[in-house]
Image (cartoon, grey):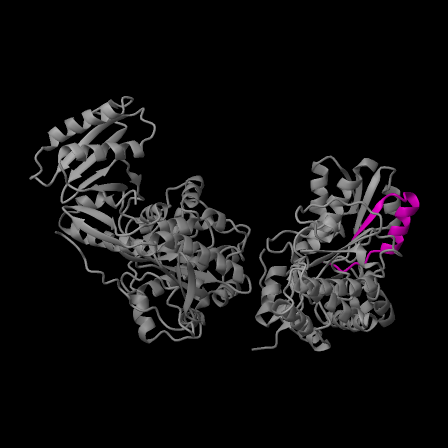
Amino acid sequence: MKYQSFLIKYAEIGVKGKNRYLFEDALVQQMRIALKKCAGSFAVHRSSGRIFVECHEDYDFDEVTDALQHVFGIVGICPMKEIEVQPYESLSKEIVAFFGGEYPDRHHTFKVHTRRLDKTYPMNSQQLNEELGGDLLEAYPDLSVDVHEPEILVNVEIREKVYVYTHILPGPGGLPVGSAGKAMLLLSGGIDSPVSGYMMAKRGLKLDATYFNAPPYTSERALQKVIDLASIVAKWTGPIWLHNINFTEIQLYIYDKCPHDELTIIMRRYMMRIAELIARRTECGALITGESLGQVASQTMRSLECTNAVCTLPVFRPLIGFDKEEIINISKKIGAFETSILPYEDCCTIFVAKHPVTKPVLDVIERHEHHLDDKIDEMVKRALETDEIIVVDEKGSRIVKHREDPLTGELAKNIEQRPAGETDPVKTESADGNASVSADSPKTAPADEK
Amino acid sequence: MEKEIYLDNSATTRVFPEVAALMNTIYLEKYGNPSSMHHKGVEAEKEIRTAKETLSQILKCRPQNLYFTSCGSESNNIALIGGALANQRAGKHLITSKLEHPAVLESMKFLESIGFEVTYLPVDANGHVSAQDVADAVREDTILVSCMFTNNEIGAVEPIAEIGEAIKKKNPKTLFHVDAVQAFGKEEIYPSKMHIDFLAASGHKIHSPKGIGLLYVADGVKVRNLIFGGGQQGGLRSGTENVAGIAGMALAAKMLYSDLAGEREKLFAMKEHFLRRCEEIPDVIINGVPALYGKKIADVGEEELSASVRTTAPQVISLTVPGVRAEVLLHALEDRNIYVSSGSACSSNRPHLSETLKAIGVTGDALDNTIRISTSVMNSMDDMDAAADALKEIVPMLRKYTRH
């Protein structure tokens, strides 16, 4: 083991005042979930306002850092060497050797930064900085000191052991998933909605998702594509409960009864209504969409006014001010782009009019919607009752509620308050594929606050 | 659950139970490597020998003319690329039609990229290549002509014997490759009589498994190998032979060819019946049946239709339903447990307009409104009725809701 532990840096959480411990707890929990997926045995603990990962046995460095780099809230991951506390002479030798291994090419500027938390150590921080700096220069003459903007900061912390690190791997930033609550993502098969989900998860939201399916106009592969996209987002957010709504009947009814240039707007209003009803059922505090102002007819300001009017929950539209190019860049960064551009028709596009309204007027839309009064309530109710619920995580998916299953018992409880720290819904597959995810919160003894 | 009606047999077929049973025995008992010196090897080699004998009787050729590959595409690739590379000293000109499968067209594109010249011949409205056109295109430096036997999308059967004769008359050195993936198991194919030098066939189109292909190479024809390795199959196709697949393919072929005329008649009768029933679906167009070209089904007499159908592939029906997107129709049929394909399944993973349909002059929306129904001996007349009934019901419903 080259590095025995990791120091985790988290910037934003640090300034959360009295709530700080809530965020830190959430972060520690998310890190534990992430590390559970890695081979090895790890302990995550907080100590003097810092979070450490201790590696108890051999592990795969790339696997572990990759897992941690997907945990929102982390801004930096510092792989550390642990050295026994010992007299300066031998300690210095170990640190110099470690540095040599980390930087085989030594044409760098550096600075030593020591924190002495164990005040019984015979030298103080300043003395250690000077002595270690001198020893490093002597060992590697190509180095030079720069105390203002060093290329390499050699961090040495003296506690119950001596911790040394010289690298910081970037984390994804943001806030730990779940620390801001849970929201419902309207997930289509496109480029925007997965990015939207990613961005809101980054601000601490846990995600549920709703997908509108319109067989036979959309295919099984279109659903698979959405599951694949959810799975990519789940790498960042943890398991996503995906509600697959059969929207065909409603869509055809709108087509029958309403002006065709308003189809998309009215359709989207029903999608928002249904998503909100599911959000209420699953205790989501907001809706998330991938809308970007002016991108298409249904995303003009007036169109947004019309779709927004049916919602009482806040609607988060993190991409509203983004250009397509910027959205694509994020999509590529999170690895969703290749899947997003697979050409399967989704239900938003099947009946698109050649010239949809771009400036719909709310009361006109509302008036036209009254043409649906006969049957629409019943259809919405049916759509809600026949949702298929698929739990998707980064490894795969499984159906927890088939269309015909009633939403009762354990399942009903689980969709509201998803088991804290649920990790691996795929592994817990039951024989009939019909049972609910067990609430296995990881009860590893918290080694908090020493 | 409604009965499953599988009408996508040109995409792939269900394996005959007899074939699965034979293969199972080979997997579990005769699992030796045919190249091994010991008994297990000899036993496996014997399976291949038997298979070759069976297939050579069907094709009226020598067992030595047959090679096994992993699929029809590979057989086509070896014939075209291996054939062109081995014969390029005689010339660099190749001929094919616009109607070919991508395994042929993409191989041609590759050959163009390395300096060969390719002529692409047009087809008529029923998908036929004319032997005269081929003869006119053959030059002194034409080393190879490639033509499919049966088109996979519209079921046009090409005049292979006639084309073969025309080629050899014009230039006896020009090689003739036939992609018979859709025809093998449905047509009588005699390579030597038809002047065929290369012939490609595939196992999974004839009720044996995926992963096995057949390549016929006529005596004395030069062809370069594309796979390098242990030198199996005379060095043309290295790699341990897929013994079970080979035996399975041979058995399936034997079963189909034991009563080919009977099988064909059964399929033709089903096709004819289905086409008749299409009268009940308003405004549909049948592609690839000459008697129906530009005509309404109701206006074509019993005998004329019957005779015309028998000039086409017995197993393929191409149906254009104006106003209904093929993919939607496919999924609507799927809802009733009826499986068909939109265009050619090999390219329909991606919504992509069919080159074949374009080649026969289908244009605009009709390209996206065409489904293919393909039958096999495992289907029945009832299946045809079920499909016709379903279409009759679904089509008007879907037409009501169209994009505009």
Query: Does the magenta segment cover residue B64?
Result: no
Is A123 on the left or on the right of A378, as rendered?
Answer: left
Q: Position of residue A34 (x, y in %)?
A: 31, 54
- Residue A281 is drawn in which quadrant? bottom left
Furthest toward the right, the residue is B169
- Residue A243 is drawn in which quadrant? bottom left
User: What count of labels does the image hold?
Assistant: 0
Query: Does the magenta segment cover residue B157?
Result: yes
In the picture, the quarter occupied by the N terminus of chain A is: top left
**Residue shown at 76%/57% (left/top)?**
B151
Furthest toward the front, the residue is B38
Q: Is residue B321 visible?
A: no
Is A66 on the left or on the right of B400, as rendered?
Answer: left
Is B113 on the left or on the right of A210, as rendered?
Answer: right
Q: Nearer the viewer, residue B378 or A196?
A: B378
- Residue A286 is drawn in which quadrant? bottom left
**Residue shown at 29%/68% (left/top)?**
A439
Q: Is residue A209 visible?
A: yes
- Compared to B1, does A440 lie above or below? above
Q: Position of residue A277 (x, y in %)?
A: 35, 65
Q: Position of residue B393 (x, y in %)?
A: 63, 72
Q: Which residues are magenta?
A: B153-178
Q: Nearer the viewer, residue A145 or B311?
A: A145
Q: Position of residue A445 (x, y in %)?
A: 19, 60
- Compared to A22, does B49 lie above or below? below
Q: Nearer the viewer, residue A136 or A443?
A: A136
Is B105 on the left or on the right of B292, as rendered?
Answer: left
Q: Nearer the viewer, residue B47 or A81?
A: B47
